[in-house]
Amino acid sequence: MIKVNNLEKASEFEVFDELVKNEHEQVVFCNDNETGLKAIIGIHNTVLGPALGGTRMWNYKSDAEALTDVLRLARGMTYKAAISGLNLGGGKAVIIGDADKLKNEKFLRRFGRFIESLNGKYVTAEDVNMSPEDMEFISRETKHVTGLSESIGGGGDPSPVTAYGVYVGMKASAKKAYGSDSLKGKRIAVQGVGHVGMYLLEYLVKEDVELFVSDFNLDRAYDAASKFGAKTVGLDEIYDLDVDIYSPNALGATINDDTMKRLKCQIIAGGANNQLDDEKIHGKMLIDRGIVYAPDFLINAGGLINVGIDYLGGWNKEKVYKKTERIYQTTLDILNLSENKGISTQDAAMSLATKRIADFAEIK
């Protein structure tokens, strides 16, 4: 009884309308009264391989909001894997609730049993409010999990690799916008200083930039400012800053009708998923504004590369970072394709990703 595109109550068939529109294969609702577990697993596409995507735990305002999030995220993972050259499909899971209050071994192992029931069609990893240690609990109930701690032979926390991909994608965007990939002297607003944001700041501070940071967790924002010599700004104030680069690394849809009127940057490059509130409308508006946009599912793919190689076998750090470094050239290729064809960078990236999926489907 939910309508996922505007979160209003509607007929149950409108959920299927949404699945059909974006070609999702399967949605699984998980409930366990004993532990309080409420989760949704979204499987978008498995043409290239099993649907791999992290599990995030969030205190969603409604079940409909959680469903909307998992559908958008699962779809993004499909194209992220495809454009990164991984033989993996796209999926995602969300757990509804307060991680500090609900998460424990029993809770996580129950979730692991739900994953196991899908017989390998979905593979999980960590995401927001989940850790490698949480993955270890889940792995006691299913082998379809990756991103385990390096101490037990896994690929560990994917956040540093995600941040590296965002960094090289940002440098490629600077190359396109300014003719040089040096970030020296650039004013950069980093929205969200969680795991990825903090690692990104480590790369940026070495380039002698001027940094601005914001985060809903003020202590985290102040910590980042102190550590990296940044200036803290308000959650809403960040959109009005006169900066060269805006880097969204929190939740999605921050590029929308309101913020598009306020942003003064020349480049948008960040690690958040689904940054465009509407891919078609806001992708076109970015062209009209002359803003270079590095598609999120391309430049934030480092984490997926890390856990994907871990799951598929043959993981080592050098291999992971070498593959992630290719994001630089792919970003340049997409920015040039966008310019040559007069299409948004989002559409340019999607065209490459969908072509790989279509080609693979024909081979199968």
Image (cartoon, rainbow, N blue to C red):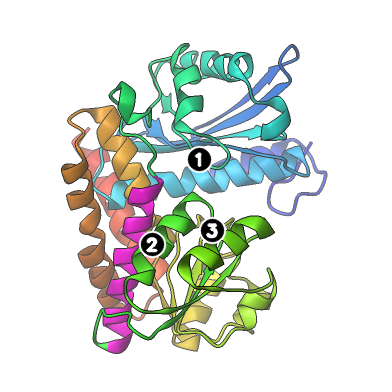
Give the quadrant of residue 125: top left
Q: Is residue 357 above or below residue 123?
A: below
Q: Which residue is mark 1?
A: 127
Q: Which of the labelled discs sits on residue 193, or is there none?
A: 3
Please report whichever mark, 3 or 2, sits nearer to the chain's N-terminal start.
3
| Local crowd size for mark 3, using a 10 Å CA cut-off: few (<14), some (14–19), many (≥20) | many
Give the quadrant of residue 39: top right
Q: Is residue 109 above or below residue 295?
A: above
- Quadrant containing the N terminus in the rendered view: top right
Side of 59 where 242 appears, left or right = left
Q: Which residue is mark 2?
A: 202
Nearest to the observer: residue 350 or residue 147: 147
Please count the marks in the image: 3
**Which residue of the protein is positioned furthest toward the front in this rendering?**
226
Classify mark 3: helix, strand or loop: loop
How far is the residue under mark 3 from the one under mark 1? 14 Å
